Amino acid sequence: MIFGRKKPEAEVAPVEQIEDVAPEETDAGQAPSSIEEQAAQWDAAFDREWGPFDIEEVDLEADADEVQRLDLDTLVLTPFEGMTLQLQVNKDTNKVQSLLVGDGQSALEVGVFAGPAKSSMVDEIRSEIIRVTEQQKGSIDIVEGPFGAEIRRALPVVDPNGNPAMHMSRTWLVGGPGWVLRGVLLGKATFEPDNDEAQVALEEFFGNLVVRRGTLPAAPGSLLPMTVPQQSASEG
């Protein structure tokens, strides 16, 4: 982690003071009855201690690492060496709908969505992705990834020459206070999911993202637009 993590206002109780739950009151050791239940368990086991972060969880002002971050209002990015960045901008509003980060061989598309304040809608989004994939005659697999459950999809497409092909992707979904962050991994890291070197830069990038939800009302599941950073606007 490269940020200063904000200190909690109160001390956390020592582990020995936390009452253990009796084994018969838990589902530990029981196999999940469906892949979606297994996915929910992987999500529950994932801890955002190492990101992605909410703006209230980090202290960017305390940084002494001299990293030049990009602030898109809703999302704060930490660039890495050799990173390419494309912004998907709505021409009518000049708001960024999503961004595409690349490392030369793989790419990561990132979007931020509104979520419930005190619960997560990751399960609902994942279920919708599964439903749409099945409608499009694609195949899907749910595995344990670096950010909880990971969705691996293969969708039938037609290449530029008119030949049948498969579009491969890996999707990460992370819920925070009032938001859901989605990352769709493409390229070499998708075709070689066990190749750590092929995904390390984009995985660290995703983990270093900071979400600034803001206070404007938004329907759960709706896209939270970002703002073109001044540096990019001046360069364009």
Image: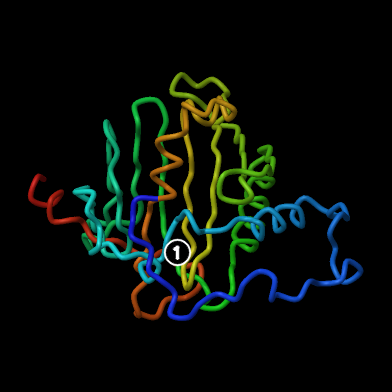
95 up-or-down from 8: above or below: above
The image quadrant that residue 124 belongs to is: bottom right
118 up-or-down from 151: above or below: below
Q: Residue 104, position in %: x, y?
A: 34, 26
Q: Residue 229, position in %: x, y?
A: 18, 56
41 up-or-down from 195: above or below: below
Residue visible at 47% across and 58% down in the picture: 181
Q: Residue 148, position in %: x, y?
A: 61, 51
Residue visible at 49% across and 63% down in the picture: 180
Residue visible at 35% across and 67% down in the picture: 55
The image quadrant that residue 165 belongs to is: top right
The one nearer the camera, 6 or 170, is 6
Residue 222 falls left or right of residue 119: left
* The C terminus - image quarter: top left
- Secondary structure category for the residue under label 1: strand
Identity of the amino acid at label 1?
Answer: Phe
| Residue on which the image places disc 1 | 113
Q: Which residue lies furthest to the left in this view?
A: 234
The one nearer the camera, 185 or 210, is 210
